[in-house]
Image (cartoon, helix red, strand yellow):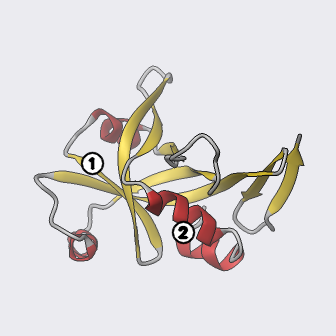
């Protein structure tokens, strides 16, 4: 697993495009696992704080319960338009709940405004990052895993 900062250091050409996708829109799609193992998709907001990508949620939402039970997640950026002109990004790995008061205070201090009420937050430990773009009549898929070089290929 890796932090966002690890990803930036290992994939400096890919990281800005992925970050731009997540910063271009407020809402994204989070996939978690229900208690019966079936998938759940939920809207979510994410932010970049220090070395980490962090997601926040209303206190004790179903997605929070899912992540507490099974930390695996997939996060899909909101692609904005059907042309995928700026690409489409996905993160996957494990979510670690922010429970330490100092860590939560640091997170809150970096927010543009305080949370509207009680909340839960998780930093994302990355297992894979994928960025897809359209190049001419091909789709280019670039993928990164911790400790490995970026791998890219095109599909027509």
Name the front one of labels 2 and 1. Answer: 1
Q: How many marks are shown on the rendered structure?
A: 2
Q: Is residue 26 above or below residue 106?
A: above
Please state, as top left, top right, bottom left or bottom right, where the N terminus lies in the image.
bottom right
Residue 15 relative to residue 61: left or right: right
Q: Quadrant of residue 116?
A: bottom left
Residue 20 relative to residue 119: left or right: right
Circle 2: element type = loop
Q: Residue at x 47, y 76 (%)?
A: 51
Circle 1: element type = strand
Relative to the observer, which residue lies in front, 39 or 13?
13
Q: Residue at x 69, y 68 (%)?
A: 14
Rendering coords of residue 37 (x, y %) = 50, 24
Residue 105 relative to residue 136: left or right: left
Count residues near mark 1 (Cα–Cα under 10 Å), then give few for <14, some for 14-19, many for 20+: many
Distance from the alpha carbon under mark 2 to that under mark 1: 20 Å
Q: Is residue 130 above or below residue 40?
A: below
Count residues near mark 2 (Cα–Cα under 10 Å), then give few for <14, some for 14-19, many for 20+: some
Q: Residue at x 30, y 56 (%)?
A: 121
Rendering coords of residue 92 (x, y %) = 58, 49
Label disc, if present, on residue 57 of the rendered structure = 1
Please state, as top left, top right, bottom left or bottom right, where the C terminus lies in the image.
top right
Q: Which residue is mark 2?
A: 3
Q: Quadrant of residue 96?
A: bottom left
């Amino acid at each position: 697993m890796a932090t966002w900062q690890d990803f930036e250091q290992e994939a400096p050409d890919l990281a800005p495009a992925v970050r731009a996708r997540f910063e271009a829109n407020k809402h994204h799609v989070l996939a978690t696992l229900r208690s019966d193992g079936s998938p759940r998709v939920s809207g979510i907001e994410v932010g970049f704080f220090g070395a980490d990508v962090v997601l926040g949620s209303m206190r004790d939402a179903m997605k929070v319960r899912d992540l507490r039970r099974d930390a695996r997640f997939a996060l899909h950026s909101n692609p904005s338009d059907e042309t995928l002109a700026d690409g489409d990004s996905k993160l996957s790995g494990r979510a670690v709940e922010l429970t330490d008061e100092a860590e939560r205070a640091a997170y809150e201090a970096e927010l543009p405004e305080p949370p509207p009420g009680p909340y839960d937050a998780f930093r994302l430990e990355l297992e894979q990052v994928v960025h897809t773009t359209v190049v001419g009549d091909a789709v280019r898929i670039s993928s990164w895993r911790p400790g490995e070089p970026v791998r890219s290929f095109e599909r027509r």
